[in-house]
Image (cartoon, grey):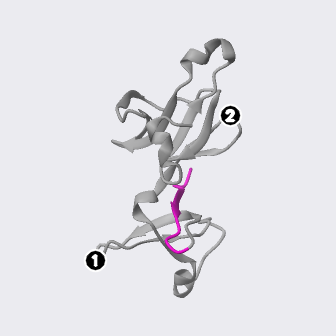
Amino acid sequence: MNKPKFRALNKKSNEWVYGVPIPNGLSKRVFMICLTLDVEIAYPLEQLHDFCVEVIPETIGQYTGLKDKNGVDIYEGDVLVYDAPKKYAHRRSMHEIAYADGRFFWKFLDLIFCQSNILYRDGYLVIGNIHENPELLSGVE
């Protein structure tokens, strides 16, 4: 069974952290437990706070379970480009990865959802994400 995997930007260091988000219903603060949760490892509850990091809520993205052509994990919020061979350069396109209705979708950079689920295709490269590279949303590389 695949365990959900998330990433978010650490609020203090602005670096990516990985784990499981813990929303706080009493405030807008969100924390991430930065642990690898395995059945062989048990963490004492009194030490869990040592693994909590406050994150920027808007940057939380779930791992899609897919990798790009270079083996890089693809997360919600990543921007991918289809690295088409030269003879198909007219097919070069950029997409944001989004999550809706329990599925990951390609989202064209004009912010219209593609009508199909993400299907793995060779040739896609992660070129950034919408949080660190907002200029990609305007199609500027």
Check the image and report above or below for 98 versus 57.
above
Decide whether the magenta segment is chiefly helix, strand or loop. loop
- Between 2 and 108, which is closer to the camera in this rendering? 108
- Circle 1 is placed at which residue position? 26
User: The disc labelled 1 sits on which kind of residue?
Assistant: Leu
Quadrant showing the C terminus: top right
- Between 112 and 138, which is closer to the camera in this rendering? 138
User: The disc labelled 2 sits on which kind of residue?
Assistant: Lys
Q: Where is residue 84 in the image (x, y as percent from the top left)?
A: 63, 21
Q: Is the Cβ of the residue at disc 1 closer than 8 Å to that at disc 2?
A: no
At horizontal 53% and vertical 54% (from top left) the residue drawn is: 132
- Between 37 and 109, which is closer to the camera in this rendering? 109
The answer to whether any part of residue 76 appears in the image is no
Q: Quick one: label 1 or label 2, which is nearer the N terminus? A: 1
Q: Position of residue 20 (x, y in %)?
A: 50, 64
Q: What element carries label 1?
A: loop
Q: Where is residue 117 in the image (x, y as percent from the top left)?
A: 44, 31
Q: What stretch is highlighted in magenta?
A: 1-12
Q: Which quarter of the figure has residue 51?
A: bottom right
Residue 41 is covered by the magenta coloring: no
Q: What element carries label 2?
A: loop
Q: Report the Cα–Cα distance between label 1 and label 2.
A: 42 Å
The answer to whether any part of residue 119 appears in the image is yes
Disc on res. 69: 2
